[in-house]
Amino acid sequence: MMFNNLLLRHGSFVTYPVIFLIILINQPISGQESMLLSDEHLMLLVEELGAQHDGNIDLTILQEEFAQLAANPVLVNYASFEELARIRLLSDFQIQSLINYIHKNGPLLSTYELQFVYGFDEELVRLILPFIDLQNTERAIPADLNKKLASGKHQVFMRSIRKFDKESDNPPNTNSILGNPTKLYLRYDYRYKRKIRWGFTAEKDAGEEFFKGINKYGFDFYSAHLQINNFGFVKNLSIGDYHLRFGQGLVLWSGFSFGKTSMALDIKKRAAGITGYRSTDENRFFRGIATTLTHKNIDLSFFYSGKKIDGNITEYDSTLNKAITISSLQTSGDHSLAGLASDKDAVVEQVFGTNLTMNFNKVKTGLTFAHTWLDTELNPPDRYYNQFYFRGKQLTHLSGDYQLLIKRINLYGEAAYCFGRGWAILNGALFNVSSEFSFAMLYRNFEKEYFSLYGNAFAESSGGRNEEGFYLGAEISPIANWKVSAYFDAYKFPWLRYLVTSPSSGADYMIKIDYHPSSQIEMYWKIKGESDVADINDDLPGITDQEAINRLKIRYHLSYTTSPKLSFRNRIEIARYKTGDFSPEWGYILYQDIQFTFRQIPVDIRARYAIFDTDSYNTRIYTYENDVLYSFSVPALFSKGTRSYLLVKYSPGNALSFWLKYSRTRYSNKIPDGFASVIPGNVLSEIKFQIRYKF
């Protein structure tokens, strides 16, 4: 019935992309490398993380890590385990296997030799090629400090984003927002190899004031950082804004964090310690000074952070001109409305602590201490689900973590204690049974009293508390060019949750089949299901009845090239949502992507046309979109309509690049609930413009 309705509802809009796809599949494929396959993995990860965070995601650091690796590839023949770990595409087993191969056979002479390393195959080698170098000596580095700094690279970014209503051609919601509806972004960045990096970022969200009101000094958010690496015993020194990532994320892990993704084995976190902050999240970062000192196999880190963060003010002292009590911490960074602006910088937060890490070849252990102090009392309103939430001003944490590599088994974990509150424990294992089969297991148990402001461990729910679960993931390559990835995760919540007024449990699973017949064609099939429970009516007092909720998504995705300058993506995805005995809700999306690079002019074009139809927000589908550099777009599409965008990049020289993106969502009737109060009519459109200058 759903597919019959698809044809009836959209008519020629369906037949055109399908016929176009059939014609293109039968075109000859060139022997050149694909223009799309290199970023397929990043695309899938961003899409899945965007779905986990409801489209709000900033992966600037992840994208920068790959860009920096490409600019400064790892010198494989004498790289340490830690240096090889910078290549996120390699597992611990593959890293150790590569080290053992070089130790036994001598330096690699050709990239083709990588295919003979145990655990490597043609696809993996192709993916890591941009990030490795087989030369046996470091490139010459100027001895004079001034010459060193002069050989560094500068970048300046300027970006503007504006949403419009096509019918009125006026910016939305002009009567309620405080400032101009244009979003502005400015960034400067200097980098000298992996030794020195500094820069600053400034951002104004749409609707925020600019050089007036609460932002008398221009932008709503400013960030700056200086990072120095590997100078004598100073492994790292960060001044200004920075990230902290230790252990498995039970205590300190700011910024993005991978959870359950299509990379079923990639569940172990690789702690980066202290890294410079270059994103635009206005709350979840650290501001102050941090350093890591190293001696032989021991790293000792110290950090202090003091900054203002947002909070929902419930009690305010006008004489002291400060908040006395807040009900919750705000993390959106949006100050476009009067109520949101009043919550800005309501709380002074200070964090200090230390980490000791000892790395002895195949054994790595760590100890982390952190103390957090707020100058304002955090006191959430009493609800059935938040009886064990943190209330107060101070938190103290102590944790220990470990990693152990025994032949083909990698054991790891972390145990953390929040003083006066409770424990959190996570343990995992990776098993490399053979080059064709590997699997992973993970157990976590977070007590309902446990709480960490910067915890970001592997978990089903956000917050890292009130959860116990067991995860099992596997990857198998049964025959050449085929790979099957799968996971199953079962979990329970010992205490109540929001909209669930009794202890509950759930499970989810994923199966993904990849097929790579050549370097120009890549396709996969993916099934993802989830079961959970929710109250039938959360307005009823006391314990209410519950209904089972089942979600299912099925996807087919194809990427291919027809010439060195022309590449395509196609996808069809179906979503199903069912509650109790009610009839299931359905949704689907079908899209066509095109990427074209001109031969004679430095212009790159990416475009998409998509049709979607869902019965409700419950069957929304998230789709990754190509965007301007260091910006990410993962919109949730629901209701009925079409989505299209055009992204143009123009690079007249090595120093200067321009991006322009126009995106448009047209709904069949009216903009669905949730947008109607913002924009009239049935069209949402957005323009992004970005300039980068390198010198």
Image (cartoon, grey):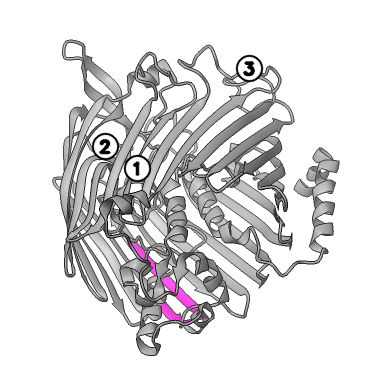
Q: Earlier in the sequence, mark 3 or mark 2?
A: 3
Kindly check if marks 2 and 1 are in contact, taking CB atoms under 8 A apart as contact: yes
What are the residue bounds of the magenta stretch? Answer: 432-443
Say which residue label 2 marks: 387
Viewer-nearest of discs 1 and 3:
3
Q: Amino acid at mark 1?
A: Leu
Q: Earlier in the sequence, mark 2 or mark 1?
A: 2
Q: Residues within 10 Å of mark 1 (few under 14, many from 20)?
A: some
> Is residue 273 something one can see in this rendering?
yes
Question: Is 514 situated left or right of 104 in this image?
Answer: right
Q: Amino acid at mark 3?
A: Asn
Report the residue at 34% width, 61% height from top: 270
Report the residue at 39% width, 86% height from top: 106
Say which residue label 3 marks: 170
Report the residue at 56% width, 42% height from top: 657
Kindly check if marks 1 and 3 are in contact, taking CB atoms under 8 A apart as contact: no
Q: Quadrant of residue 647?
A: top right
Say which residue label 1 marks: 496
Element type at marker 3? loop
